[in-house]
Image (spheres, helix red, strand yellow):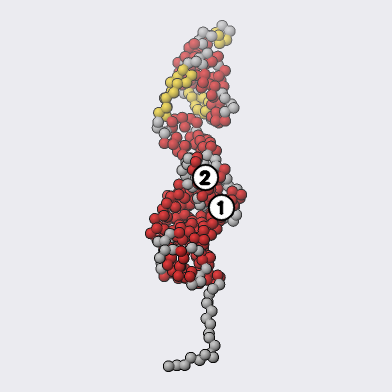
Amino acid sequence: MAEINENKPIRRYRARHRGRSEQVGIYLGKLLRMFVYQSDWKVLPMSALIAGLVGMVTRRRIFITMEGTLMGSFALVCVALWNGCFNSIQVICRERDVIKREHRSGMHISSYIFSHMLYQLMLCILQTGITLYVLRFIGVQFPADGMFTPWMIVDLGITMLLIAYAADMLSLWVSSLAKTTTTAMTVMPFVLIFQLVFSGGMLTLPAWTAPLTHFTISNPGLKAIAAQADTNNRPFVTISDMVGRMRNDEVTTTVTLGQVLDILTDRDNPTVAEIRKIEINGTMTMAEIKELLYTSETVAVHRNDPFTEGMTVGDALDLLEIMGFWEENADQTIELHSTVGEVADIMAANPDIQSRRDESYTLTTTVGGLLDIAGEKKVRTFLEDRAAAASYNADYALTEDNILFYWLHLMGFIALFAFLSTITLEFVDKDRR
């Protein structure tokens, strides 16, 4: 048996890698190896697929119309939330036993969470870049100029990154609370539904639920994207499109001559003012003018009125007939140039027409016919502008203060959920075996 040398100094082994910064590097390296060898990289092609589906649905409306932009903004929030939530929903609960063992051996929970924060930030940056590239490739037309950078797509990328990262930290906290991956995946759909329903943008919420929007990542995220997309200054086309689809619908109404004249002579109405400017240009032959004079009820009523001394209106017409004027000049044409306003003013000044103001007429036409009279493009523009003005939302105003406030709100969520994850895991040793 070997003898023990009592004089030999005892070698004391000092625990290695006890520093927090050293542990961050170790766990970050571990996560990167898991990204490569445990197929965590699959979240990247999944984000491309989701972006492609959303882009195909929204590309013809987002950044073009008000309602299309709002719907597209909500869709982009959904993409960012989905990417962030499913990045980290299982990362802690799947290795909970390992965390407990290593924590008892000297692992700092703050180092462990911080390494996850760095790793998840890397994933969110890659996913955001892939999402924007796919949207651009599919044909989404992003506005050119940004507010904080020279490119709007970069400003939008910052917002989507903050949304995805905040959702990622929320899922990290859920993962630290859940004891198993099954529990985490069961809870996750409810978290997503809460975020989407109480975003405060797409669904009209009862008044008592309005405060709940302050506890969602989706609310500041949606407002930030809608503001960056300049939603308030996009045309609201739903109403004008509806009118267009009604072109063939018949419209029957009863109006009096006086009502028509009052409308056409209302110079203070901007829409009527545009109609009054419409030019009436045409050509009539002398034969057509003769037909009009001899069949006009107005001329018939005034045939006995004096035309000149010793001659009535009827006498003057008969004289032209006797002289063969109409026959000799039947093919001669006369150019007529006037405007709707001039004709309306002449009619309004005619005593005979004024005496018939109470006569009523039943008109049957189509919506398309009315649009053609007023000018379909002008009507559509008018409806779109008025609807957009009525739908204005101060939360979507394109201002630096607005967007910075929403960014800070999202950063606050990131810090809060990371802190809660750290506090929750500090009690991991108290899990029941």
Residue occupying the far left of the picture = 182
**Residue placed most toward the observer, 57 or 26:** 26
Q: Residue 409 has which mark?
A: 1
Amino acid type, label 2: Pro
Q: Residues within 10 Å of mark 2 (few under 14, many from 20)?
A: few
Circles 1 and 2 in contact, beta carbons < 8 Å: no
Q: Tell me the mark number nearer the camera, choosing from 1 and 2.
A: 2
| Residue 79: % across, % down | 46, 54
Amino acid type, label 1: His
**Residue in view at x 55 percent, y 70 percent:** 20
Q: Determine whether 391 is above or below 9 in the image.
A: above
- Whether residue 48 can be seen here: no
| Residue 368: % across, % down | 43, 32
**Residue in view at x 57 percent, y 22 percent:** 345
Q: In the rendered image, which quarter is residue 291 located in?
A: top left
Q: Residue 211 has which mark?
A: 2
Q: In the rendered image, which quarter is residue 248 located in?
A: top left
Which part of the image, by quadrant, shows the C terminus? bottom left
In what element is the residue under mark 2? helix
| C-alpha gap between disc 1 and disc 2 | 15 Å
Q: Residues within 10 Å of mark 1 (few under 14, many from 20)?
A: some
